[in-house]
Each structure stands twice: as structure tokens, then as C-alpha cells.
Amino acid sequence: MVSYLIRRFAFLVVTLVLASIVLFVLLRLLPGDPANALLSVGATKEQIASARADVGADLPVIEQFARWFSQLARFDLGTSYISGLPVGPEIAQRLVVTVPLTLLAFVLAVIIAVPVGFIAAYKSHRWYGVALSAVSQLGIAVPVFWIGVLLVTFFALRLQLLPAGGFPQDDWQDPAAALRSLALPVITVAIVMAASVTRYVRSAVLDVLGSDYLRSSRALGASFAEAMWRHGLRNASVPVISILGIELATTFLGAVVVESVFALPGLGSMLLTSIAQHDYPDIQGVLFVSTFAVLIVGFLADTAQRLVDPRLRASVSGNRGGHRRVAAVPGTTGTGAVRS
């Protein structure tokens, strides 16, 4: 497992380097000149040449990339063309909003989706099991911004229980005010995420309920709760962990929509402003940090899967030895169940 983690971490670093190259190239392929961020309408040729020299756009592309990559190696994301401030501290300040929003919505979605998905599977032949499945399918189809608008209209404008948008200027110095500001955005994101996760939890539980090892455990005298705890829970959690990682990464990347609806000064709003102003260092910094966060989430989800399911660890060791030794690994049964 340790050797696998080392290889997986090395792969993460290589992927991050390749992502930095792709980000740099794609931004340079976009129409427009980065020097335009420093110029007003009607600038002279001398002013354009001076602005290009200030931002380094007059240098060869290879040299521009060498500068960008050397800054990344020093954990320096550059300096904004517009504000003249370092990009790293600005992103860190925006993450104070985006990260709590993402994590709180993720936790709330899991709390909702796991029991609802289990009930929808276990009672799939009852009317309320079918109803829960239908509601989750509807939640996937509804756009997240529409849910946000509905929540603002009802809870903020009509009932006036929560703020419609914005975030305290002193950030988290007043936790109660900060949490009130994030309440509606968190609920908005959690509803959409919970609807998606519920579908996958339901599918995973249905597979476990129809498995031979669960029926065998019940035939040997185990109660349903004991059989699910010993065999079903870990088997059902393996695919769900992968989906949770994808949902968490997608929510982090999609925060731009929710932050726009609720006027939150997070990473998404910073990206939109930077694109409108052609502020290349800000754009590169936000996209690089977002890519890094997605890779970390994928790394953690993959690691969690292998900790839960010994068959995945066996496949790693089996591939290293030139063959697979899944069936001989302690902790698994011939029918594929994962023993606790």
C-alpha cells in the first residue's frame, strides 16, 4: 500500500506538471493580447509595446513558459496585471469562502443521500421507495441556479430568515454571520449533490441486496442488519466513494454558478472577473489551484477505496508480481464479498 501511494503521488505530480503546460498553452491560444489589460481604448503603438514588455508578452513563448513554471516551482502564482498584487494571497482569501461552501454542502449532501438512497433501495417495491427515487431523479434535472433563485425568493425575500447574498467583510471573525451568509448557497449545492449521490447509493445498495453473499449470510442465521454491517456496507461503499470524489471535485469547480447567484466573493467570482479583464496571472492561478484541488480529491478517493476494499490492494500487488492474486487474499470470499 505504501509503494502504491508513492507511485500514485508521483503520478499526481506529473499530471500537475502536464496540466500547467496545457493551461499555459490554451491561454496563449485565446484571441487577444494580455497587454490589453493595462491599456485603455486608443492606446498608441508605443504604449502597446511598453505594456507588452511590462507583462512579458514580448518574450518568446518558451521563455514565457519558463518564467511561469519557475514561479510555480517556488509556489509563486505571479502578480495580477490589474491590481498589481500577488495572485497567491488573493486566491487564499477567496478560498476562505469557496472551500467552506464546498465542504459544508458535501457533508450535508452525504447526510441526506446515504439514508435516502438506502431507503429507496430497501423499499424499492413500496410507494415511498419509488417516490424517493423519482424525487432524486427530478433533483438531478433541475438547474442549480434555479434552485438558488427559489430559495432566495422564499427564505430571503418572503420570510426574511436568511440573507439573499454577500459575505461579511471580516470573513470568519463572526462565524455566525458567515454561516448565515453561506446557509442558502450550501443548501442549494447540497440539494443538487444529494439528488445525484442518492441515485448511486440506491444502485449500490440494490446490487448488495441481490448478491449471493448477503443471502448466504442470512441463510446462516445472521440478521439483516448484521449481514449488511459485516458484508453489505463495505461492498456498497466502494463505488459510492468514487462518486463522492467526483461530486466533490465537480462542486468545487462549479462554485462559479452558485457564487454568482449569491454574490459570494469566492474563487468562481474571481475567475469570472479575471476573464472579463484579461488578467492572465489571475486566470492561470485560479485554474491551476482548481486543477490541483481536483487531483487531490481524486487521490484521496482512490486511496479511500483501497483502504475499504482489500481486493483493490490485492490487484495492485498482483500486477506488480506479474499476475493477479485476488481470490487468495484474506478478507474476501469466493462470491466477492468484502469481510470486515
Image: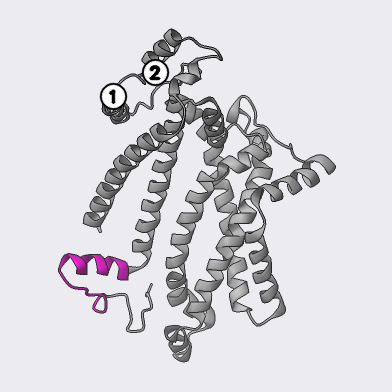
Residue 246 lies, in percent from the top left, at 47, 55
What residue appears at the point 48 percent right and 20 percent down from the top-left corner? 36
Find the magenta span and give its range: 311-329
Residue furthest right as drawn: 158
Of the two numbered discs 1 and 2 on the same chain, state the one appearing first in sequence. Answer: 2
What residue appears at the point 38 percent right and 72 percent down from the top-left corner? 340
Q: Amino acid at mark 2?
A: Val
Residue 159 lies, in percent from the top left, at 83, 43
**Colouring:** one colour
Q: Would you say 106 lies left or right of 321 here?
A: right
Q: Does the rendering let one see residue 226? A: no
Q: Is residue 218 above or below residue 337?
A: below
Q: Amino acid at mark 1?
A: Pro
Q: Is residue 31 above or below residue 245?
A: above
Residue 7 lies, in percent from the top left, at 23, 52
Residue furthest bottom as drawn: 219
Callout 1: SS: loop
What residue appears at the point 59 percent right and 28 percent down from the top-left corner? 171
Residue furthest left as drawn: 321
Residue 181 lies, in percent from the top left, at 67, 37
Q: Looking at this view, is 110 or 81 the one in front? A: 81
Q: Looking at this view, is 3 or 195 the one in front? A: 195
Mark 1 vs mark 2, CA separation in Å: 12 Å
Hey, which quadrant is residue 258 in on the image? top right
Callout 2: SS: helix
What residue sits right under mark 2 in the picture?
55
Hey, which quadrant is residue 287 in on the image? top left
Q: How many numbered circles are shown?
A: 2
| Residue 210 lies within the magenta run | no
What residue appears at the point 80 percent right and 47 percent down from the top-left corner? 154
Query: Label 1 neighbourhood size at 10 Å, few (<14), some (14-19), many (20+)?
Result: few
What residue sits right under mark 1 in the picture?
60
